[in-house]
Image (tube, coloured by chain):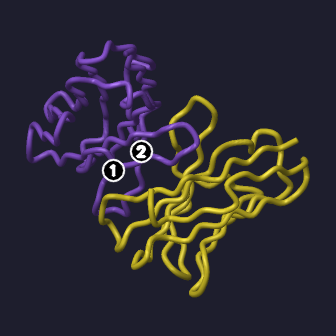
């Protein structure tokens, strides 16, 4: 998983707080994907971004969740007013151009909600 | 139609044995089928992948068999080793439409010494 950097690796929040998860793609990659992995389950697609543009957000919950990938800096997945059900591992993957595989994954952020 | 079904959920194999994990899909537009290996606390790492123009792909001890008509594909791990103990995920995507991966539920493989 060298190259895709996610931080923090672990994040603890109380119910109602905000969580910000950051992802820096591999060098030269301009496309970022976010996936969520609930305990004992596979990864579920959330959102796909290109710099300054959301390509596909069909997997994002309608409320409280947002994502951005600015021209400069990492991609951010933001969860407002967290609830216990948001506890999961959130993984970011990157690819160099639209439609090109494979996607390279980071080691994830483990979000725990107290 | 976007689901990928994976089985078994867990698998225990003796060292030196063959591990076989199966996946089935519905969406005939899928055109790229990777397998990922995940160790605890780590992200998924690409193991091997296949496109539907071939029926088999082999890389070292890992082989993907692909049956387009049955919409099934499988991972075979030959000469399984304790270091192969991990969770394995199959996935599928339409490369030309943005490439969101649809994952199977995962198989927890344990290789006993």
Q: Residues within 10 Å of mark 2 (few under 14, many from 20)?
A: many
Q: Which chain is yellow?
A: A
Left or right of residue A39, residue B36 in this image? left
- Dot 1 and dot 2 residues touching (CB under 8 Å): yes
Question: Where, quadrant-wise, is the N terminus of chain A in this rendering?
Answer: bottom left
Position above or below: A95 against B18: below
Q: Residue at x 55, y 37 (%)?
A: B40
Position above or below: A111 against B104: below
Of residues B92 and A90, the one drawn nearer to the viewer in this rendering = A90
Q: Which mark is residue B93?
A: 1
Q: Can you tell which quarter of the image residue A71 is in?
A: bottom right
Q: Residue furthest front?
A: B113
- Circle 2 is placed at which residue position? B102
In x, y percent, where is residue A105? 46, 56
The numbered mark, 1 or 2, whose residue comes first in the sequence reads 1
Question: Where, quadrant-wise, is the C terminus of chain A in this rendering?
Answer: top right
Q: Residue at x 75, y 64 (%)?
A: A20
Of all chains, the one bearing label 1 is: B
Q: Which chain is purple?
A: B
């Amino acid at each position: 998983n060298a190259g895709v950097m996610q931080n923090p690796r672990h994040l603890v929040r109380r119910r109602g707080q905000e969580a910000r998860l950051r992802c820096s793609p591999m060098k030269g990659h301009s496309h970022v994907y976010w996936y969520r992995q609930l305990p004992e389950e596979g990864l579920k697609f959330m959102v796909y971004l290109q710099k300054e543009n959301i390509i596909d957000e069909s997997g994002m919950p309608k409320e409280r969740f947002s994502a951005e990938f600015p021209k400069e800096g990492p991609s951010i997945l933001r969860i407002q007013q967290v609830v216990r059900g948001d506890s999961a591992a959130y993984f970011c993957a990157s690819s160099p151009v639209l439609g090109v595989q494979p996607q390279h994954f980071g080691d994830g952020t483990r979000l725990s909600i107290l | 139609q976007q689901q990928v079904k994976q089985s078994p959920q867990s698998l225990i194999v003796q060292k030196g044995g063959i591990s076989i994990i199966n996946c089935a899909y519905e969406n005939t537009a899928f055109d790229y089928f990777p397998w990922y290996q995940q160790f605890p606390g780590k992200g998924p790492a690409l193991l091997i992948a296949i496109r539907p123009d071939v029926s088999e792909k082999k890389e070292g001890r890992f082989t993907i068999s692909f049956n387009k008509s049955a919409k099934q594909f499988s991972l075979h791990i030959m000469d399984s080793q304790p270091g192969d103990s991990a969770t394995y995920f199959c996935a599928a995507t339409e490369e030309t439409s943005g490439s969101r991966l649809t994952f199977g539920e995962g198989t927890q493989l344990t290789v006993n010494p």
